[in-house]
């Protein structure tokens, strides 16, 4: 059996694994992005209201209700009434009236003129299980933001989201490059970082100062990566378990961790301190809170520091060598197990930091928040090039920009699909990804 035959068989196995990997990604996307439709008749609690102008009902006015259970859309009926069912009490829901569906020259006006967004109201579902939301409708001018200003705002938001996504995607890419594991439990490592931060700095828990609690949460996330490698992944590697079996194990681990989180924190949304900080006008329509600006700065500093570690340190160079060729790296005297252990620690720490930043971006902490962006993390890794840390960075920024900017043209519910569509298009012309290397067959 010649070398060409062995290489061809190896590439055939790689293709089969890649095909299965793609199928699992599609199935995960269907389950992770699906939002259950809520009907007023099926849920025990209800939010309702009337939309009238001078006592006359307004029909066909669109409203959006966002909160636990997902986002719902409803229109007023012939009597100007609307209602939706919601699943939980003691939670906050955001009701937004779409002013574009109001008659010409009519707008939502605040009685005191103190609110910049009178068409958006937050309500809390009390113990009674019924909440009524009314809007003041009258003649007025609507504040219209130009398309260019909206585009700039979306680009900045997309950059912030992309850098946060890159922190998680880099760790995912490193793990794949050094071990070949497609870790579907990486989303839960992101969730763990946010939950750990909440229990450390939350007012109802240890209430540590943020400058102490957040670094400690990142450390705990790094410890989680080390523990998972020590008790699960390293024994499986030593038994030479195949990559497909490892992928299935990671899916099972993902489900186990996800529902463990739900057991501890419930199905509601938890908030970190300072999550309600006011936005500061910067230029044009661009508004960022102090938390937003700090998140951007932290993401950039950490990514630059990681790049220096990867290119300048001895351990970083060994990590790149193992990603390129594990067998050759081992033959050169590199302790592969030690490097892989460090990779899991770094991946856990980066995922934990990404979870904290994502909790402010959403905003809020939920038991399945990591699973909601897992498909985007994989998209960033595949788009940039499998196993390349810099490729994951480039792919994450592209995905973040596409997700935010595309919402100017398509409904918000479909904005994640735009990133996956671009992923498919790019892979059709460059199958190895943007920074991936083309492999020789035969």
Image: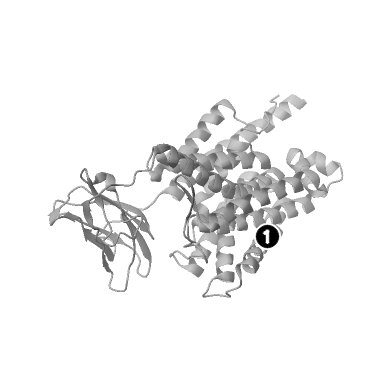
Q: Quadrant of the C terminus?
A: top right
Q: State left or right for residue 181 relative to residue 61.
A: right
**Closest to the observer: 147 or 141?**
141
Residue 167 placement (x, y as % from top left): 62, 50
Q: State left or right for residue 320 relative to residue 58.
A: right
Element on which disc 1 rests? helix
The residue beneath circle 1 is 222
Residue occupying the point 55% across, 41% down? 379
Query: In the displayed image of the protein, which residue is found farthest to the right?
Result: 333
Residue 240 can be seen, yes or no: no
Residue 211 placement (x, y as % from top left): 64, 66
Residue 50 can be seen, yes or no: yes
**Closest to the observer: 248 or 343?**
343
Q: State left or right for residue 333 relative to residue 84.
A: right
* Quadrant in which residue 212 is drawn: bottom right
Residue 435 placement (x, y as % from top left): 65, 33
Residue 153 placement (x, y as % from top left): 47, 44
**Closest to the observer: 144 or 427?**
144
- Mark 1 nearby-residue class (10 Å; few <14, some 14–19, many ≥20): many
Tally the numbered discs. Answer: 1
């Amino acid at each position: 059996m010649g070398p060409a035959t062995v290489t061809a068989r190896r590439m055939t196995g790689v293709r089969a694994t890649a095909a299965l990997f793609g199928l699992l990604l599609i199935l995960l996307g269907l389950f992770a992005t699906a939002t259950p439709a809520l009907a007023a008749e099926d849920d025990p609690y209800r939010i309702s209201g009337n939309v009238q102008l001078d006592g006359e009902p307004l029909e066909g006015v669109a409203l959006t209700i966002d909160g636990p259970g997902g986002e719902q859309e409803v229109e007023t009926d012939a009597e100007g009434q609307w209602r939706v069912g919601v699943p939980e009490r003691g939670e906050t829901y955001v009701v937004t009236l779409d002013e574009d569906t109001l008659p010409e020259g009519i707008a939502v006006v605040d009685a005191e003129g103190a609110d910049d967004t009178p068409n958006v109201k937050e309500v809390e579902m009390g113990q009674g299980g019924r909440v009524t939301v009314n809007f003041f409708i009258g003649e007025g001018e609507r504040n219209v933001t130009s398309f260019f200003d909206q585009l700039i705002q979306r680009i900045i938001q997309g950059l912030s989201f992309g850098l946060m996504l890159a922190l998680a995607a880099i760790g995912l890419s490193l793990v794949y490059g050094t071990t070949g594991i497609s870790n579907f439990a990486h989303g839960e490592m992101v969730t763990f970082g946010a939950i750990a931060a909440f229990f450390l700095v939350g007012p109802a828990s240890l209430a540590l100062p943020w400058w102490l609690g957040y670094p400690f949460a990142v450390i705990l996330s790094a410890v989680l990566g080390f523990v998972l490698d020590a008790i699960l992944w390293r024994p499986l590697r030593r038994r030479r378990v195949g990559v497909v079996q490892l992928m299935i194990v990671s899916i099972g681990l993902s489900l186990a961790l996800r529902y463990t989180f739900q057991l501890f924190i419930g199905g509601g949304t938890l908030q970190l301190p300072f999550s309600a900080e006011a936005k500061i006008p910067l230029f044009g329509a661009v508004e960022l809170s102090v938390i937003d600006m700090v998140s951007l700065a932290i993401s950039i500093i950490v990514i630059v520091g990681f790049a220096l570690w990867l290119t300048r340190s001895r351990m970083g160079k060994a990590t790149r060598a193992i990603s390129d060729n594990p067998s050759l790296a081992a033959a050169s005297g590199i302790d592969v197990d030690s490097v892989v252990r460090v990779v899991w620690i770094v991946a856990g720490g980066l995922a934990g930091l990404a979870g904290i930043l994502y909790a402010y971006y959403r905003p809020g902490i939920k038991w399945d928040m990591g699973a909601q962006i897992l498909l985007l993390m994989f998209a960033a890794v595949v788009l940039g090039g499998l196993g390349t840390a810099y490729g994951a960075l480039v792919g994450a920024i592209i995905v973040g920009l596409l997700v935010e900017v595309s919402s100017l043209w398509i409904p918000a519910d479909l904005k994640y699909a735009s990133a996956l569509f671009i992923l498919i298009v790019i892979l059709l012309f460059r199958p190895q990804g943007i920074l991936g290397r083309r492999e020789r067959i035969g």
